Image: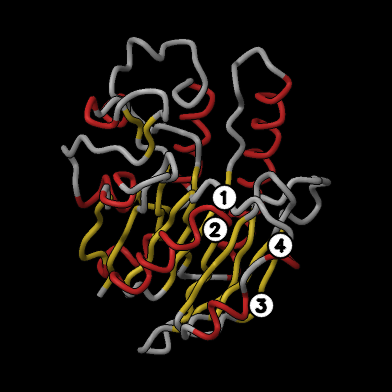
Amino acid sequence: MKIATWNVNSLNVRYPHVISWLNKNQPDILCLQETKQDNDKFPYSDFKSLGWYSYHNGQKTYNGVSIISKKPLINISLNIDGFEDNQSRLISGTYEDTKNKTIRVISAYIPNGQSLDSDKFIYKKKWLSHFYKLLKDLKKNYENIILTGDFNISPQDIDCHDPKVWIGKNLVSDIERDYFKKILNLGFTDSFRYLNPDSIEFSWWDYRIPLKRNLGMRIDHILTTESLLDNLKKAYIDKQPREMERPSDHTPVVTELN
């Protein structure tokens, strides 16, 4: 099973990139973030004509998350139950693999937070708190969960091009990293770091800085429950789409399981 996550920063703009990447890489599941379009604008029929099932939780201009799958998903759920939120940041569905193993798949777009003293950071903390509770409840009902998305959290200093430059800023604060650790402590594993303990690779780079300088962050993640730990085979970051014309500022992150 191959699963990928990609913040496309507007599916309208990046649709050709997504189709090209799907055709070339043939993942079983691709989770997207920042689609930035309403559900009635989402290209369900286009994906269907190419042999893909697609599910979307959209919002005009901002946010938006999707799951694109080779096989149909069941029990689609949107957003976080019990949390009043007008931003579309979460979608999940249940996937059955070739060995009839049931896997709950989540595509999440966690708030950026802007700065530690902003209202947006207060919102980020509130969102993460409710997200943590959701994951805790899901763990009671699903043995196998794959959690993907743009977390807007760089878990460790190794995941940041220059930790000293980022001291006191969002994405790397102790508050955010503690939430990431809390999620891991629920019984999740950061698949990329587990399989690549010493690799210094990034999934996001600022548009304003030339890509060749590689001043990036690893903020897009695929976490799996410990029940899938023995199935983890390969985890990598595909930098090629970030080098295309008019790219997203993020690039796909991929995990392969036996």
What amino acid does circle 1 point to? Ser
Q: Residue at x 58, y 63 (%)?
A: 66
Cβ atoms under marks 3 and 4 closer than 8 Å: no
Could you tell me how far apart the alpha carbons at marks 2 and 3 are, in whole angstroms?
14 Å
Q: Residue 107 got which mark?
A: 2
Cβ atoms under marks 2 and 4 closer than 8 Å: no
Could you tell me how far apart the alpha carbons at marks 1 and 3 are, in whole angstroms?
26 Å
Could you tell me how far apart the alpha carbons at marks 2 and 4 are, in whole angstroms?
10 Å
Cβ atoms under marks 1 and 3 closer than 8 Å: no
What amino acid does circle 2 point to? Ser
Q: Position of residue 129 (x, y in %)?
A: 66, 38
What amino acid does circle 4 point to? Leu
Q: Is residue 252 left or right of residue 212?
A: right
Is the N terminus in the top left, top right, bottom left or bottom right quadrant? bottom left
Q: Residue at x 34, y 53 (%)?
A: 253
Q: Choose mark 1 or mark 2, whichever is in front.
A: 1
Q: Which secondary structure, mark 2?
A: strand
Q: Which secondary structure, mark 3?
A: strand
Q: Residue 78 got which mark?
A: 4
Q: Which secondary structure, mark 1?
A: loop
Q: Is residue 171 left or right of residue 118?
A: left
Q: Earlier in the sequence, mark 2 or mark 4?
A: 4
- Residue at numbered disc 3: 75
Q: Residue at x 79, y 47 (%)?
A: 83
Could you tell me how far apart the alpha carbons at marks 3 and 4 are, in whole angstroms?
10 Å
- Residue at numbered disc 1: 10
Q: Is residue 24 above or below residue 50?
A: above
Q: Earlier in the sequence, mark 1 or mark 3?
A: 1
